[in-house]
Amino acid sequence: MKVLTTLTMAILICFSINLFASEKNGKNSSEEPGVVFGTIEGKVTDSNGEGLIGVNVFLQNTTIGSATLENGEFTIEKIPIGEYRVVATMVGFETGKVEVMVKPNELTVVEFKLRPAFYETGTVVVTGTTTQYLYEESPVKTEVVPRKLIEQSKSSNLAEALGLQTGVRVENDCQNCNFTQVRLLGFDGIYSQILIDSDPVVSSLAGVYALEQFPQEMIGQLEIVKGGGSALYGAGAIAGTINIISQKPQLNRTKVSYNGRSLDGELENKVGLMSELVSDDGKTGAFLFGSTRNRNPYDRNGDGYSELGKLNDESIGFNWFYKPTLNTNLNVSMHRIHEERRGGNDFDSPQHEADIAEWLDHLRWGGKVKWEQSFSNLFDYSMFYSFSKVERDSYYGGLSDEDGDGIFSQEERVAALDFYGFAENITQMFGGRTNLTIGNQKFTAGFEYYNDKLEDNSVKDARYHIDETYTNFGAYLQDDISLMDNHLNLILGARIDKHSELESAVFSPRASMKYELSEGLDLRASFSTGFKAPQTFDEDLHIESLGGDQRVVRNTDGLKEESSRSFSGGLEYQNFIGDVAVLFGVTGFFTTLDDAFSTEPLGEENGLVLWQRINTSGAEVKGVEFDMGIKPIQELEIRAGFTYKTSKYDETQEIFDGQFSDKFLRTPDDYGFIRVSYDPSDRVNVFSSMRYTGKMVVPNESVELVLEPEDTFFEFDLGFSYKVPAFDYFGGKLTFGIQNIFDSYQEDLGVGVDRDPAYLYGPQLPRRVYFGFSTEF
């Protein structure tokens, strides 16, 4: 807490100094006497000459900008004199750029005519470099899930917003509680970092169910960087990072929505609220969101045990900014998420009276304070503090019929109470970062201190309780070099991390390269190293219930860190042929793991099924990705991606007694997607997608066999949205459709109390019909 107090005081001092300076002069620094300004105004239209509303027009490498009005016109006032690049960006349109000279007390007029392009085009990304780059210009390859795609695909949370991107796959790993994880390039979820506004505050306990807990109302866009080509994030991001860019206030509006889904008659309801307000002078603004969701349990095979559990959640949060001066910004954000979920059977009884129950009650608080100051277009710095606190009450277990007579004794009923547990995880992080531009080089340097205190009493045997505090101090330096008239970008960087579980600090060099061979044709390559410290991971805090017993995973004594080396390289063409936007890319990737983690069974003891995490000799993941896209007309966009890879240990691993495999479990060698969006009119949108999942190796603990089912899966979605004319004043919109139309789903699900709830593969959700209504004012 001393660290928190010190950092908070430092941020408040910086804020107070600038506020005092502003008040002393009696006005914003942008209005100081003697400073001369100019004005830029103009208009942005589409290829048909129609004005575009909501286009973001800004001066590159500054915080100065504006948005277009209904007729496409914009005005940017009080611009210090000098040369600037004016940039006009809007999701789904090419980016417009023009060089201008702003002269004293003069009006500069610029006009943009933007052709339709892919949804990602025109978005601004920050994950690879911390500095703002247009998506198509970023030297670190970044996948983007824009807000428009999240809404069209009717995603209700983070888990559902992922999956229509190349190399990204979300899976359900438990029939009882529906623990989900996201795989990048085939790696387990522990190899990826989930960030909130670039901070890794999704801790091990929070990460167990986080993908379903973060509501779509919170998300402005998602940025995915696969591999570790950037030195800015922890060395544990071996497979990559998923950065949740939270929504920020831009306009004055409020949106209320209702969405319902039916799974064979079992209903899921969700109500969402988003509201944003910006002051007339643009100096302050706030974005607020809230949502509530409930889902009834779903039993697919009629055995009385759920495949999707009962769920109730609610969330609320805000994101507020204040700009005391033209070149300073204070940002404060906070959210609260409460979720209760339960899977198993006998939902009308208390958890301890069911044959199987996995029940979790989560309360999460999270937030951030960040101060930013720019002294010029060449130098800026920022300081931040972020935190999360997760409290979890749990029940993993059930009544155990020791003698098999179907009658439970008083002792058995009392023993069932032992499965109640509690966990608490407090994560704090603070740091600073600075950017300095010298000629054609932009240097980024920074540090981070991470403190993760974890207490977990979810296992009934106190010998397996966890009470640990993990810390990590990381420092990094990165050089973003532009050469050959910006045709070549090199990013050279390194970070050093000292983790509390390691005796020595770890040095991790990283490098990325982007070379523009010709207009729209880019060659990319990256190299990175990383490590995973031997600590508690999110999957260790998910306690599976097996026939009334608890499955527990713990690290073996003397477990060493896992180290990695990753390479990737590829070609990408993204340009226009005539007025048709086209995209094609191919990327190869190769990662080696030394002392790779794996798990092995230890046997049963006192109602516990024990596994331990061990080091193996090593492993490797290699493969190739293909990206394709075309936008022949403004109203139609088609995108597709396909991944083929292999993930193997250097030596065959014994999964069960006499059962061996050298493959990574639960990850297919091939998977992909296609999505199509069509706007036949200004009021109608048709969205369709297909996800393909190939075969995989899956262990089934209930029969102690390693199986390789022959099933492959194709999920088809089709949805419509319609802007209702009678509700134009309120922005009324109706949505309806079917997800997983042909009900492509696993057929050999486990049955009854003795099923292995982790024997799951294929699509995350079965067929569901959805419908909704939203209004905006």
Image (tube, rainbow, N blue to C red):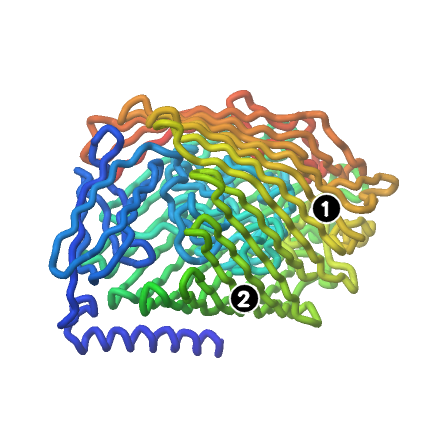
Residue at 62% over, 40% down: 588
Height in image: 611 above or below 259?
Answer: below
Residue 101's x, y, as percent? 22, 55
In front of the other: 625 or 311: 625
Q: Residue at x 77, y 45 (%)?
A: 649
Q: Is residue 353 above or below residue 81?
A: above
According to the image, label 1 marks what residue?
Answer: 620
Q: Is there any visible trace of residue 29 in the rendered image?
A: yes
Q: Residues within 10 Å of mark 2 (few under 14, many from 20)?
A: many
Front in this rendered view, residue 637 or 734: 637
What secondary structure is found at the residue carrying circle 2?
Answer: strand
Residue shown at 72%/43% (left/top)?
Answer: 546
Q: Are marks 1 and 2 in contact (CB under 8 Å)?
A: no
* Disc on the earlier residue, 1 or 2: 2
* Percent of width and height locating residue 383: 41, 69
* Screen quadrant of the C terminus: top left
- Find the distance from the CA under tag 1 to the CA under tag 2: 27 Å
The one nearer the camera, 459 or 638, is 638
Residue placed farthest to the front in the image? 484
- Residue 1 position within the rendered picture, expressed as x and y whole percent measured from the top left: 49, 75
On the image, the x and y values in percent for residue 385 come to 44, 67
Tell me if residue 390 can be seen. Answer: no
Query: Which three-letter amino acid code belongs to the residue tagged 1?
Result: Glu
* Foreground pick, 631 / 300: 631
The three-letter code of the residue at mark 2 reads Tyr
The residue tagged 2 is: 476
Q: Is residue 149 above or below residue 335?
A: above
> Label 1: how many residues lie within 10 Å, few (<14), some (14-19) or many (20+)?
many
